[in-house]
Image (cartoon, helix red, strand yellow):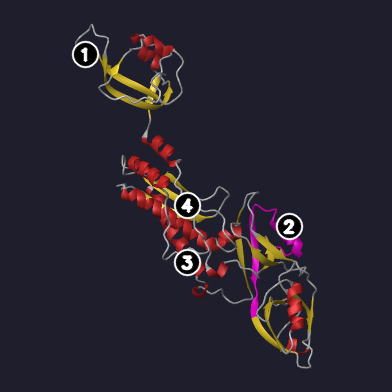
Amino acid sequence: SQATNSKVAVGGRLATILSLDCLKAPIPTSPAMLFCCDKGSDSNTDQYTITSAHVFDKVGYEEGDQQATQGAGYGADNPVLQEESLEVRLKQAFKLSFPFESVDIAKHDFEKDKVILKAEGIDNARKVAQLLKEDATLCVRVLGYTGPGGMNDGPRLLRLALERTRALRAVLSSEGCANKVAAKGLGHVDGKGPRCEIELCTAEEADNLEAEALELERRAKDALNPAKQPTPPGPRTFEVSGVRSGKDSYGLLFDCQDDHLPVIKTIRAGGIIDAWNCTAPAETRVDVGMALAAVEGKTLLSKEMVTKLNTLGSWTMTLKVPKETTVTLRREGTPLGLDVQQGGDLGSALLVKGSSGQATDAGIKPRDRIVEVNGKTGTPDELLKLLMAAEKEVVLKVHSFNLA
């Protein structure tokens, strides 16, 4: 206990040698230190030279100790010091922090801007590298997480997390670490904040994870460049399914003006559907304006479907993609021919109750949704004001699910 926080070197002197009987005393908490000493040729000296020193992670007993030590006078209570393994030391090192400089995700240019690992992270990465160099056959995976972003930031957060894991891997490599290291970014998936986690894995797991990371990166890039991956035209339906825990949120807000067809008006960042969009191909990405056509294959009233969806662990939703058209109507002494529902401030579009005249001729039908008026979006009340304020002509963007 007197040597706590002291440095002991091989070749130093021990002032006191404890008798073997002291080993029967209560064992202190880990870690422990074992010294191997040599008294030398002078039997009269009370000085002992330390020939080696060993640090142990664990103090305990092993089977067979009683029989093996009774003849030496240790007795059944003889403690055995078990040396700390590389795996244990690695797991301890993996608990270290690898912080990065924060970035403005909305302004981050993935082609020009670099992620910066802080000094603390570099030092801790070097410690991990030194341990990994003891066994080059070990494989590890680096998983990257970010904090929350804004709406529809999922693909950008995923790419940021991937860049950080690759930067951490680069530090390990620069320190002479020749181990197989797989890096994968997951973006924002929980409330634990931005971080990089390192874990041991098999070579096969590392290869699979690296392949997954490349595919996620490709899809994230596609999502950030929608012109390259246009969503197929509607109306059409597709299914989305998964498993959620009670605390997971879909991150969806619905417009339930139509009693039989709830329409997605918001997709929140960090939700189940935002995460789905980061990896899904273009034809199955969920977007604002799509309708929830069924839950578990069943069609219910709008609010009933939303309620049922929120009670499910394993879930399947059928989504319907609207057909989008642009229609121009003229006021010049002619009625627009539109009868719309007063939706207040809760909806995301003007719901058409009926049409006649030029509106019918333009293809507008009951239950169609007017989502833009003269290039502007808003609540139903705001869209209605824009519609009434138009003097000569009005340009409408209309979503149709062919329901009438």
- Structural distance between the alpha carbons of marks 4 and 1: 56 Å
**C-alpha distance separating marks 2 and 4:** 33 Å
**Disc 2 or disc 1, which is closer to the eye?**
1
Q: Which of marks 2 and 4 is in front?
A: 4
Q: In this view, does 338 lie to the left or right of 2?
A: right
Give the Cα separation between the discs numbered 3 and 4: 17 Å
**For the residues bearing labels 4 and 1, Cβ distance under 8 angstroms:** no
| Residue 398 against residue 143 in the figure, above or below | below
| Precedes in sequence: disc 2 or disc 3 | 3
Considering every residue shown, the one lying at the far left of the view is: 41
Q: Which residue is drawn at 65% across and 67% down?
A: 319
Q: Which of marks 2 and 4 is nearer the N terminus?
A: 4
Tag 1, which secondary structure?
loop
Where residue 306 sits, quadrant-wise, is bottom right
User: Which numbered marker is on residue 221?
Assistant: 3
How many residues crowd mark 2 within 10 Å: few (<14), some (14–19), many (20+)? few
User: What residue do we see at 40% from left, 43% from top?
Assistant: 124
Name the residue tied to disc 4. 144
Mark 2 or mark 1, which has the lower sequence index? 1
